[in-house]
């Protein structure tokens, strides 16, 4: 039994957050297992032991060689450029659908929703033919450049958020002499940080984990981490410690980006809403 007020507060906190603690443990357990396996020796990784007898942190150095660096750079370029291009192209479209009243706006929204329902495999063959005529097959550019024309899911999500922002803010900016572009950049988008962070996260994670697209278009020297880890797994199919080390190095940037973007998301939430 834990005596004192401090012990009672601890028990109360644990009881209040019991469900969250259990869920956090369930989500962290695979990561802990992967880390413990990654620092084991080759022989122990094939056994039923859960705790390393010796800690082999050099496994990470063995994994992070030339190929892993190249795969990481390719994935970073693919995810970062795709996310930036998506934001540049999708934000104005979503703003127009949410703020402007024009003939055919409903039809345009239906087209966006229909594009969300279209499987990418349907358009893969004609798009491959188009990109081959531009001599871009074998690279990641056929996966990056289309983001300059917007992403249907991101447009829809941003549009749904922008319609919730009161029009009074934009009207006040126009009275002060702001044009439509300046109103969007200086007034509306700062209040839409939660939606911007959400679509950026979705796009970044999708590109980082994309396996199908790079498998179709990219040559081996332009392969991403998703393909590289699969190749590494095939080459080291009995060395589970190295496979786990490679997997941890693959998901580490995703975790870092998520926690950094989470701070932006929380900050954006505090800047939204109408104060009476």
Image (spheres, helix red, strand yellow):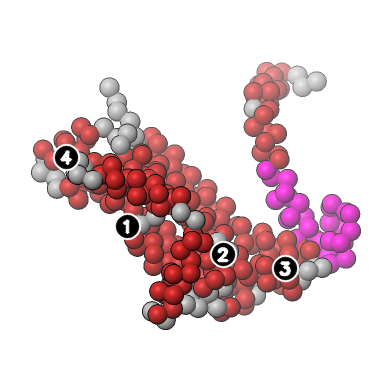
Disc nearer the start of the sequence (1/4): 1
Q: Which residues are magenta?
A: 27-54
- Circle number at residue 173: 4
- Circle number at residue 212: 2
Disc nearer the start of the sequence (2/1): 1
**Residue at the image point whose x is 88% and y is 54% from the top:** 49
Q: CA distance from mark 4 to mark 2?
A: 45 Å
Question: Which secondary structure lies at badge 4?
Answer: helix
Near mark 2 (Cα within 10 A), the count class, few <14, some 14-19 or many ≥20, is: few
**Residue at the image point whose x is 46% and y is 63% from the top:** 123
Q: Which residue is mark 1?
A: 89
Question: Which secondary structure lies at badge 3?
Answer: helix
Q: Which residue is mark 3?
A: 233
| Rendered image quadrant of residue 100 | top left
Tell me where residue 182 appears, x and y as whole percent: 19, 49
- Circle number at residue 37: none
Disc nearer the start of the sequence (4/2): 4
Disc nearer the start of the sequence (4/3): 4
Q: CA distance from mark 4 to mark 3?
A: 56 Å
Tell me where residue 133 appears, x and y as whole percent: 40, 80
Residue 155 seen in render: no
Near mark 3 (Cα within 10 A), the count class, few <14, some 14-19 or many ≥20, is: some
Is the C terminus in the top left, top right, bottom left or bottom right quadrant? top left
Q: From the viewer's perspective, is residue 87 above or below residue 264?
A: below
Q: From the viewer's perspective, is residue 155 above or below residue 130?
A: above
């Amino acid at each position: 039994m834990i005596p004192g007020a401090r012990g009672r507060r601890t028990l109360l906190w644990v009881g209040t957050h019991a469900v969250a603690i259990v869920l956090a443990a369930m989500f962290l357990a695979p990561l802990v297992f992967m880390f413990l396996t990654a620092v084991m020796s080759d022989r122990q990784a094939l056994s039923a032991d859960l705790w390393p007898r010796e800690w082999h942190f050099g496994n990470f150095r063995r994994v992070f060689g030339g190929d892993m660096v190249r795969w990481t750079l390719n994935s970073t370029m693919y995810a970062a450029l795709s996310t930036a291009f998506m934001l540049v192209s999708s934000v104005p479209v979503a703003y127009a659908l949410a703020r402007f009243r024009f003939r055919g706006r409903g039809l345009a929204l239906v087209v966006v929703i229909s594009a969300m329902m279209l499987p990418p495999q349907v358009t893969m063959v004609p798009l491959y033919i188009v990109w081959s005529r531009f001599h871009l097959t074998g690279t990641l550019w056929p996966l990056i450049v289309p983001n300059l024309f917007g992403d249907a899911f991101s447009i829809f999500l941003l549009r749904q958020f922008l319609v919730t922002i009161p029009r009074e803010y934009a009207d006040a900016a126009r009275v002060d002499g702001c044009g439509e572009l300046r109103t969007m950049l200086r007034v509306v988008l700062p209040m839409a940080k939660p939606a911007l962070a959400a679509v950026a996260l979705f796009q970044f994670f999708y590109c980082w984990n994309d396996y199908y697209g790079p498998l179709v278009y990219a040559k081996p020297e332009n392969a991403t981490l998703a393909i590289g880890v699969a190749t590494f797994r095939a080459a080291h199919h009995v060395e589970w410690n190295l496979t786990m080390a490679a997997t941890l190095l693959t998901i580490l940037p995703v975790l870092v980006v998520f926690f950094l973007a989470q701070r932006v998301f929380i900050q954006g939430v505090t800047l939204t809403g109408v104060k009476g």
